[in-house]
């Protein structure tokens, strides 16, 4: 790799290190908070919040019409004017979404047969406005691959959300402890972004570069909308057909795969987008394979641990009242893994101007998923999870094949990139399954299984891909 390529790779991995710092620290805090709240609240409380967020996630995809992503790829001399445009229009969109969310509360309450949604969505809607105030600051930090800012804002948000939420839950606030905690965390995150990024917008609405920014960001927004639709179809069907208690069990089953695997994919996508955008065609291939290789190395052992240890993890962390979530968690972990491995491919489509490919791939998948959910949702939440696993796993080979053609990359190069992690994960699985049959104490199984599994995984990975691990260490933390 050339010197400039090494510099880009080093900046990318340092960015990922800081992003994962926020990811690991913030998600550990969220996990602790969830474990506490799971014992204070009921599945119906979590289900009601999930219903509100299911509706909001569609509006969240259009929160800035892609202006933040357009700002990331802007030329340095245009950054200041584009930032002002992104901020002014982003805040207006945030206000509009806040009002739409409040107005849609009664409709959502009727559709899901949950009267409590009306007031709950009005509170959640305020977060659109609050988050819009810091969205441009976050985009500017991402443009510079300065993920220390993200680390600070996400950790502060997690702490504020947890302190407020748990305090209110102990006082008997029920579902409102989740809603008010969510809002307070968003406020704190925005304050941190303003304090860490020097950008100070003017109190005026500007249209400079607006058309070109919307043109670029518009396609990404359309893709985000269809992604939100695809990833929330299960919530919609469960909430409508099976009710809020079933949805609460389903969301708890998704909590660990989301925190440990899927959010990791989102973090990687956030870092890779500006990194890919800075790379030429030749370096883009190297960056893509590097991302795929290290993503597999990191996610495979996490997925193995979640699947094998699902039973003791649910009982120890959340309590026995959530045990119906165990088989669902195993399935959703596999779905999250397939999604994670597709992230580097999707980022390639975006930066090469071929984002419409994501739409072509998604439309048939969504259509098939709708049919499956219509047929199988009344069979329970495990059947719903199995439908999602089937769709996302089947889509992964097509996604990878098309990305390889875009980069003129042999398909086998993708396989070679993940083989070391795959072999090490297989060995880890055998060790952990053996311990699962030998040990009965849940906490002991978690500790011993995780420790033994990681020793086997890291040791075998060092034998198979030691150069990659050493390169990762040098690039992420150079002398």
Image (tube, helix red, strand yellow):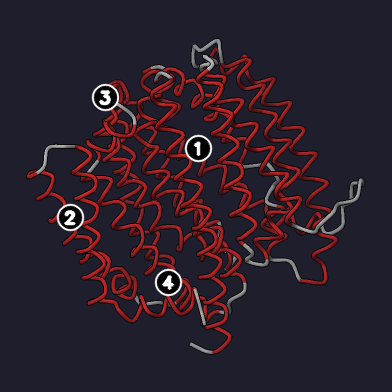
Q: How many marks?
A: 4
Tell me: residue 115, above or below residue 411: above
Q: Earlier in the sequence, mark 2 or mark 3?
A: 3
Front residue of this view, candidates 220 and 419: 419
Left or right of 163, for residue 342 = left
Q: Earlier in the sequence, mark 3 or mark 4?
A: 3
Return the residue at label 4. 405
x and y percentages locating residue 478 in the rendered image? 51, 80
x and y percentages locating residue 207 in the rendered image? 87, 52
Q: Residue at x 25, y 71 (%)?
A: 461
Front residue of this view, candidates 474 and 243: 474
Return the residue at label 3. 320
Gap between marks 3 and 4 measured at Cα? 48 Å
| Labels 2, 3: front one | 3
Gap between marks 1 and 3 measured at Cα? 32 Å
Gap between marks 1 and 2 measured at Cα? 33 Å
Gap between marks 2 and 4 measured at Cα? 33 Å
Q: Earlier in the sequence, mark 1 or mark 3?
A: 1
Tell me: residue 338, above or below residue 279: above
| Labels 1, 4: front one | 1
Q: Earlier in the sequence, mark 2 or mark 4?
A: 4
Front residue of this view, candidates 315 and 13: 315
- Of all residues shown, which one is farthest toward the bottom? 2
Return the residue at label 1. 229
Front residue of this view, candidates 356 and 189: 189
SS at badge 3 = helix
SS at badge 4 = helix
Instruction: Residue 429: give its label.
Output: 2
Q: Earlier in the sequence, mark 1 or mark 2?
A: 1
Tell me: residue 240, above or below residue 202: above
Quarter occupied by residue 472: bottom left
């Amino acid at each position: 790799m050339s010197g400039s390529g090494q510099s880009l790779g080093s900046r990318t991995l340092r960015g990922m290190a800081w992003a994962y710092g926020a990811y690991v620290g913030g998600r550990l805090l969220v996990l602790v908070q969830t474990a506490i709240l799971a014992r204070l609240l009921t599945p119906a409380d979590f289900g009601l919040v999930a219903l509100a967020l299911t509706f909001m996630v569609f509006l969240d995809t259009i929160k800035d019409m892609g202006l933040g992503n357009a700002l990331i790829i802007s030329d340095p001399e245009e950054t200041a004017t584009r930032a002002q445009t992104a901020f002014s229009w982003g805040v207006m969109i945030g206000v509009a979404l806040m009002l739409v969310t409040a107005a849609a509360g009664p409709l959502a309450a009727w559709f899901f047969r949950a009267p409590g949604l009306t007031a709950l969505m009005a509170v959640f809607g305020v977060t659109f406005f609050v988050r819009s105030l810091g969205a441009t600051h976050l985009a500017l930090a991402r443009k510079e691959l300065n993920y220390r800012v993200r680390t600070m804002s996400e950790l502060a948000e997690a702490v504020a959300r947890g302190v407020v939420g748990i305090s209110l839950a102990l006082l008997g606030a029920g579902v409102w402890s989740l809603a008010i905690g969510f809002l307070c965390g968003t406020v704190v995150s925005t304050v941190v972004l303003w304090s860490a990024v020097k950008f100070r917008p003017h109190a005026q609405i500007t249209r400079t570069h607006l058309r070109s920014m919307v043109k670029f960001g518009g396609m990404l927004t359309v893709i985000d909308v269809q992604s939100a639709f695809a990833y929330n179809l299960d919530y919609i069907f469960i909430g409508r057909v099976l009710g809020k208690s079933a949805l609460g069990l389903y969301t708890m089953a998704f909590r660990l795969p989301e925190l440990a695997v899927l959010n990791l994919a989102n973090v990687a996508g956030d870092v890779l987008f500006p990194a890919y955008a800075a790379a030429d065609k030749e370096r883009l291939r190297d960056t893509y394979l590097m991302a795929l290789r290290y993503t597999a190395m990191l996610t495979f052992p996490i997925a193995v641990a979640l699947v094998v240890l699902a039973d003791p993890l649910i009982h120890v962390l959340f309590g026995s009242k959530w045990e119906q979530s165990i088989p669902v968690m195993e399935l959703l972990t596999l779905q999250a893994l397939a999604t994670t491995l597709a992230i580097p491919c999707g980022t390639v489509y975006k930066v090469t101007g071929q984002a419409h490919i994501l739409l072509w791939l998604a439309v048939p998948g969504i259509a098939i998923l709708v049919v499956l959910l219509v047929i199988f949702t009344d069979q329970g939440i495990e059947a719903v999870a199995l439908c999602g696993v089937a769709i996302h796993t089947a889509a992964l080979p097509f996604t990878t094949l098309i990305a390889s053609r875009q980069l003129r990359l042999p398909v086998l190069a993708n396989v070679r990139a993940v083989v070391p992690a795959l072999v090490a994960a297989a060995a880890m699985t055998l060790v952990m399954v053996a311990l699962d049959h030998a040990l009965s104490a849940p906490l002991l199984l978690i500790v011993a299984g995780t420790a033994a599994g990681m020793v086997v995984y890291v040791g075998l990975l060092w034998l198979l891909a030691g150069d990659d691990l050493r390169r990762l260490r040098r690039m992420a933390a150079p002398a």
